[in-house]
Amino acid sequence: MDKLDELFRLQKEFDSYLENNRNITGISLDEWVQKGVIALIAELIEVVNEVNYKWWKNPFEVDIDRLKEEMIDVLHFYISTCMKIGITPDEVLKLYKDKTMENKLRQMGLSQKKGYAISEYKVKELKGEDNE
């Protein structure tokens, strides 16, 4: 079993445990997705709270172990939400590869989506124009 399959297996096991032991029933797909996204946002905020994003406060030493823990919390909710909408580990990999290729094409100016090309940015930079 590969690592992504193992993560999905572990998450499925944990989600089933929660649903059974917390008597979670009758939640529609759109409610699950909303709950999953809200949980992702909350966990991402916890990630940001672990680093020095508040320029108005004295900086602190980042606790890497705590930061890693928060990133894993993000992964838990991401995988759980993927499973709720029927995304498999194989599909995650395929969609990730496809999106990475599209992002590269955008950066090279070879995509249908405009405004991403590094060459356009460099030309504007050389001309002293704003890059928004």
Image: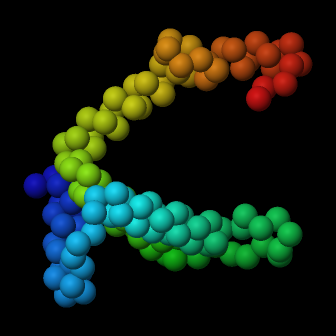
Residue 19 falls left or right of residue 106: left
Residue in the picture at 52% in, 63% down? 41
Residue 124 falls left or right of residue 21: right
Residue 47 falls left or right of residue 93: right
Does residue 83 show up? yes
Q: Residue furthest right?
A: 128
Residue in the picture at 59% in, 17% down? 114
Residue in the picture at 17% in, 55% down? 5
Q: Nearer the viewer, residue 70 or 39?
A: 39
Quadrant (top left, top right, bottom left, bottom right) of the C terminus: top right
Residue 8 falls left or right of residue 70: left
Residue 105, percent from left and from top: 48, 19
The image quadrant of residue 11 is: bottom left
Residue 81, percent from left and from top: 32, 59
Residue 119, percent from left and from top: 66, 14
Judge whether 4 appears above or below 53 on screen: above
The image quadrant of residue 32 is: bottom left
Q: Nearer the viewer, residue 38 or 80?
A: 38
Judge whether 77 appears above or below 24 on screen: above
Does residue 64 show up? no
